Image (cartoon, helix red, strand yellow):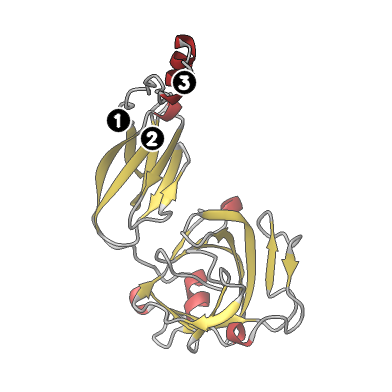
Amino acid sequence: MKKTIPFFAFLLALAACTPFEESDIDLPAQPAAPIFTAEFLSGDPNRVVVTNLSAGFFDFTFDFPGGIPAKSKRAVDTVFYTNAGDFVITLFASGEGGGGVSQSSKIVNIANDATAQCDPMVSLLTGDCEAPGKCWTFTHAAEAIRVGPTPGSEEWYKSPVNGLQDAQYDDQFCFYFEGAKFQYANNGQTVDPWAGYVAVPFTPPTNQTWLITKGTGDGGKDQIILPVGAFIGTWDSGPVYDIASLTETELVLRSPIRNQNGSPGTGWFEFTLVKI
């Protein structure tokens, strides 16, 4: 006897085999280009103040290739350029609800390289502003490195007497007044904070420069400015350092912790260096 499938059952089976198609989702329109200003800091032709004038964006980031800092999420910030040239500043802004990212750019012209003048602080840093220069290295005393959530704090770590690695104690950080040259001499190895704090082969860049700026640090401290990627003390610091104290024989620096991609991390270092 031949069996037949009821018609309504056939329709149910057919419906079960039909693929589900979701209705189109309307995404927000691409946001308009963000608006910002870029103006030179009064009296300083190597510093540019940027101000985000846009509103209604979910997120935004300033990009400063060749500047210090390299990026910023502050609505108002100051970028420092050590070298002369044309530099592009770009503001990236994200719209609400996945509407995409828009951007706008401006070009700033830095007329001259930033230069150092021989004053008492520069003289202490470089060795009387004379040609031989002056080199610094970590002290073997306790608290050569201190780490904490705020400048000068030590809640997270403070090194004991002789508590650093040999690859840190043989590091030299040298400052030369002539040409404002900075040299990091590491004897072939540098401790890598992103690989378990082991010493790895590393060849520091050459022809780097330094500059001291007055009153630009935390609490109005003077700062040492190095090129992007350069560092003093540990690889995950810099390139800007507050001068906590400086004498003929001792240099104490503070710097925010830096992520491997160059973005700001969480917390601060304090390094105590001594004259070689």
Crowding at mark 1 (Cα within 10 Å: few <14, some 14-19, many 20+):
some
Instruction: Determine whether label 1 and label 2 are within 8 Å by CB.
Output: yes
Could you tell me residue 260's position as x and y percent?
Answer: 50, 62
Amino acid type, callout 1: Ala
Camera-side mark, 2 or 3: 3
Q: Earlier in the sequence, mark 1 or mark 2?
A: 1
Residue pointed to by mark 2: 93
Give the farthest residue toward the front: 1
Q: Would you identify the image quadrant in which residue 143 lies?
A: bottom right
Q: Which SS class for mark 3?
A: helix
Could you tell me residue 122's position as x and y percent?
Answer: 47, 72
Crowding at mark 2 (Cα within 10 Å: few <14, some 14-19, many 20+):
many
Q: Would you identify the image quadrant in which residue 252 lies?
A: bottom right
Instruction: Determine whether label 3 and label 1 are within 8 Å by CB.
Output: no
Q: Is residue 195 left or right of residue 181?
A: right
- Marks 1 and 2, Cα distance to the nearest angstrom? 8 Å
Q: Which SS class for mark 2?
A: strand
Residue pointed to by mark 1: 33
Q: Which disc, if any, is residue 159?
A: none
Residue 34 visible: yes
Q: Is residue 87 left or right of residue 14?
A: left
Could you tell me residue 42's position as x and y percent?
Answer: 37, 44
Amino acid type, callout 3: Ala
Amino acid type, callout 2: Ala
Crowding at mark 3 (Cα within 10 Å: few <14, some 14-19, many 20+):
few
- The foreground one among 190 and 10 is 10
Task: Please state, as top left, top right, bottom left or bottom right, where the C terminus lies in the image.
Answer: bottom right
Residue 176 visible: no
